[in-house]
Image: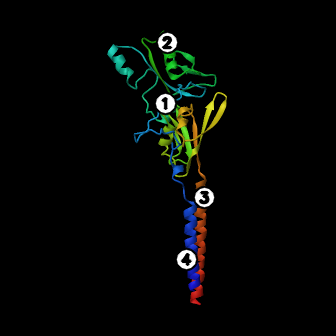
Amino acid sequence: MQTIHTFIKRMIFFGSLVVTFQSCVSHQSMISLNGADEIPNDLKSDQLVQYTQLHNFESYKIRPFDQLLVKVNAFDGSTEEFLNREFKTENTFTRDIDYNPASLYFNSYFVDESGFIHLPLLGDIEVTGLTAPQIKVKLDEAYLPYLKFASTSVRLSNSRVTIFGEVEAPGVYYLYNEKNTILDAISLAGDFTEFGNREKVKLIRLTDEGSETIYLNLHRSDFIYTEYYYLQPSDVIYVEPTKYKSRDVGARFTSIVISALSLAIVVVSTFAFNR
């Protein structure tokens, strides 16, 4: 009987060791931007500040199937009323809306496959290849024959990214800034999980030629100097799991097996003792 109990204890101890070693994740692999930067030998401060020119940001150019929120304001009373209305949500052609994804969808103008949007009074206006500010200038000029002191507001309403994989809160996120970075998206998704592979973050981007897939190493800080540091609408980000996750799954399975074996041994030893 003592031999059986000793065997059970050894099995439990062995199972604990297996789980501990297989589920271990190195501290270094859990840190972003931890690449080796060159530090001068004569550094006399405990802080190192590095300045490097970022990649020039290029405003997004409208493509077919984008969605544009267009608001038009025109002078029809006093100058004070015109200026006050300019900074409100009131506009000539659309009602007040809540700025949530569903409302933006139903209140936006879709760019058709030929690159046009259809607007009141103006009809079809070509917008592909233009930025939102350039479209505003174009619409302001186009409305002059119809509206006195017309002023338009143009915003891209489908500015969203998809992020999934080893992040705390995967999903589709709408971005309401002109310049958004991949770090913004990862932060919105709650940062990496403990098994997120920072050395191989996949970015899928739609281009005029098709889809482009890029792998970014977020251990190194020099990725922020590339054109992929800034996001574009409809970008997809996938964070792959590290090899430690498969070990963790294996460790859980091993733990279950060992627990089952231990239970079986206890049952067998109990019956043997009763005899």
Q: Secondary structure at mark 1?
A: loop
Pointer 4 local density, CA inside 10 Å: few below 14, some 14–19, many at least 20: few
Horizontal and vertical percent for residue 99?
45, 33
Marking on residue 141? 2
Q: What amino acid type should be assigned to the residue bearing mark 2?
A: Glu
User: Could you tell me which quadrant the C terminus lies in?
Assistant: bottom right
Figure check: 153 above or below 22: above
| Distance Cα–Cα, label 2 vs label 4 | 84 Å
- The residue wearing badge 3 is 247
- Mark whose residue sits in front, 2 or 4: 4
Looking at the image, do the residues carrying marks 2 and 4 touch, with CB atoms under 8 Å apart? no
Q: What amino acid type should be assigned to the residue bearing mark 1?
A: Lys
- The residue wearing badge 4 is 9
Looking at the image, do the residues carrying marks 1 and 2 touch, with CB atoms under 8 Å apart? no
| Distance Cα–Cα, label 4 vs label 3 | 24 Å
Quick one: label 1 or label 4, which is nearer the N terminus? 4
Q: What amino acid type should be assigned to the residue bearing mark 3?
A: Arg
Pointer 3 local density, CA inside 10 Å: few below 14, some 14–19, many at least 20: some
| Distance Cα–Cα, label 1 vs label 3 | 39 Å
Figure check: 67 above or below 265: above
- Mark whose residue sits in front, 3 or 2: 3
- Mark whose residue sits in front, 1 or 4: 4
User: Could you tell me which quadrant the N terminus lies in?
Assistant: bottom right
In this view of the protein, can residue 47 be seen by the observer?
yes
The single residue placed furthest to the bottom in the displayed view is 275
| Distance Cα–Cα, label 3 vs label 2 | 63 Å
In this view of the protein, can residue 193 be seen by the observer?
no
Q: Secondary structure at mark 4?
A: helix
